[in-house]
Amino acid sequence: MRTWSFSSAGTLFFGRHAVRHHLGDACNRLKAKRAFIVTDAILVKAGLLAQTTEPLAAAGVSFEAFDRITPEPGVELVRECVAAARACKPDVVIGLGGGSNIDTAKLVAMVLAHGGDPLDYPGDCRVPGPVVPLICIPTTAGTGSEVSPAAVFTDTANHIKVSCLSPFLRPNFAIVDPLFTVTCPPKVTADSGIDALTHAVEAFSAVDNDAFPLPSGEKSVYQGKNPMADMMAGEAIRLVGRFLRRAVKDGSDLEARDGMALAATLGGLAFSNAGVALVHAMEYPVGGAVHVSHGAGNGLLLPYVMRFNLPQRVDQTAQIGVFLGRIEGNGLGELADSAIREIEQLRRDIGIPTRLRDLGVTEEMLPGFAAKAFAIKRLMRVNPRMPQNEGEILDIYKAAW
Ligand SMILES: NC(=O)c1ccc[n+]([C@@H]2O[C@H](COP(=O)([O-])OP(=O)(O)OC[C@H]3O[C@@H](n4cnc5c(N)ncnc54)[C@H](O)[C@@H]3O)[C@@H](O)[C@H]2O)c1
Ligand SMILES: [Zn+2]
C-alpha cells in the first residue's frame, strides 16, 4: 500500500454564528492588525460584509474591502484586486463569498507574497512558498475552496478557466457559518450544491491511491482515492441526497442549510486530497467559452462522465446510490445505473440544464473543447478510466450536446 496524506485548512470553525464568535480570535492568533476583504456587491447588500466587519472592529483589526468581484472573474479583475490590496498593505486577506471571491482572495495573498502576475502560477505546485495569511468565509455551500489548495480564475485571452494548485493556498482559517448561505437564491443554491456533489463523486470514484499515475519528478496536490477522503465524500453525498432539494425549495430551511454547508466542506476535504477529474477538466473549456456557472456546467456533465467511467467503477457507483438513499435494482450493474439515474433526477428537480446546446454551445465548438480538456493532465490522471485520446472526450461532449 502506498502512503497517503490528508490536508485541510489550518483550523476549521463550523456552525451557526461561527463568524461572529471566531473571526476576531482567528485574527488574534495570526497577530493580524489590518485586513483586506475580498467580496462583492450582492453580499454587501445582503448584510454579510457588515456581519464580518463587526467582529473585526471588536477585535481591533482595521480593514478595507474590495467589493467588486463578479462570478468566475477574469484575470483583469483579479489584477485590479491585487493592486488595491498592494495599496492596503494587509497582514491578513479575508475571502468572503462564494468560490469566486475566495479564490480571488487566495490569488491576492499569493501575488502579494511572491510578486508577478496571477497567470504566472496556474498548474500544480508552482507557488514557491507561504502566502499572506488567509481566512476564508464561504457564503455558498458548494466549492469547498475554504479548505482546498485551489484558486480558479478565467484566462480571458485563451477562453479557459485555469487553476493554481498549491498546499500554500490552503487557508489558515476556514470559518463556515451556514447562516451566511441563507440569502443564496435558488439558482445559486442549486448550482453550488451540485458542485459539492460533483466534488464528492469525483473524489469517491477517483483512481486508487495505489495506482495514481504520477510521473516521477512531477508533483501533485491530488493523490487518488483513499480511505479518509472516502469517508468525507460518502457523508457529503449522503447530505446532498438529504438536503439539496430542500435548500433549493426553501432557502430559509435552516436544517437544510446546515446540512449543505457541511456537505460542501466535506466535499472540499475529499476532493482536495483525492482529486477531481474528468468532469472538472471538461467543464473548464465550457465555462471559458459560454456563460454558465461552474456548478451548472459540472452538474450537466456529471452523469455523462459517470457513464463513461462505469466500466471501472461499478461498485463505487452503486455505493454512491446507497449514499444518496434512493436506488433500486438487482446486482451491482442495475444499482449503479439507478444511482446515475437518481443524479439525473436530482439535476432535473433543482433546475440544472441537461444539454450543452441549451447553454449556447455549438457542435463546432466540441472538438476544441475536447483538445483543451485532454490537455489538463493533472485532472485526467485522477480519472478512474483515463481517456486515451481526444476522441473519447469528444464522444462524451457529443452525448451531452
Ligand atoms: N478553489 C476551489 O477549490 C474551487 C472548487 C470548486 C469551484 N471553484 C470555483 O468557484 C467559483 C464558483 O463559486 P460559487 O459556486 O461559490 O459561486 P460564486 O462565488 O461565483 O457566486 C455566484 C453568485 O452568488 C452570489 N452569492 C454568493 N453567496 C451569496 C449569498 N449568501 N447570498 C446571496 N448571493 C450570494 C454571488 O454574489 C454571485 O453573484 C468558480 O470560479 C469555480 O471554478 C473553486
Ligand atoms: Zn468544482
Image (spheres, helix red, strand yellow):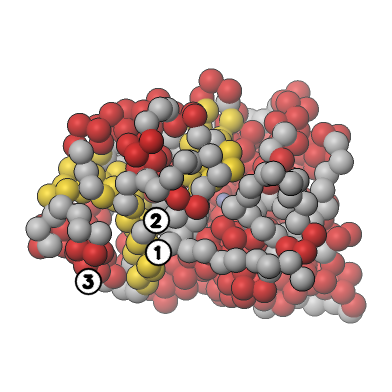
Q: Secondary structure at mark 3?
A: helix
Whole-number angstrom distance, CA of label 2 to CA of label 3: 18 Å
Residue that label 1 marks: 10
Residue ID at (62%, 73%)? 228
Residue 240, can we see it?
A: no
The residue at 20%/58% (across/down) is 31
Q: Is mark 3 within 8 Å of ligand 1?
A: no
Label 2 lies in ligand 1 vicinity (Cβ under 8 Å): no
Separation of marks 1 and 2 at Cα, in angstroms = 7 Å
The amino acid pointed to by label 2 is: Pro
| Left or right of 362 in this view: 399 | right
- Quarter of the rendering containing residue 15: bottom left
Q: How many marks?
A: 3
**Can you tell which of label 2 and label 3 is closer to the viewer?**
2
Say if residue 131 shows up in the picture.
yes
| Amino acid under disc 1 | Gly
Provide the residue designation for mark 2.
Answer: 171
Q: Position of residue 310 (x, y in %)?
A: 84, 59
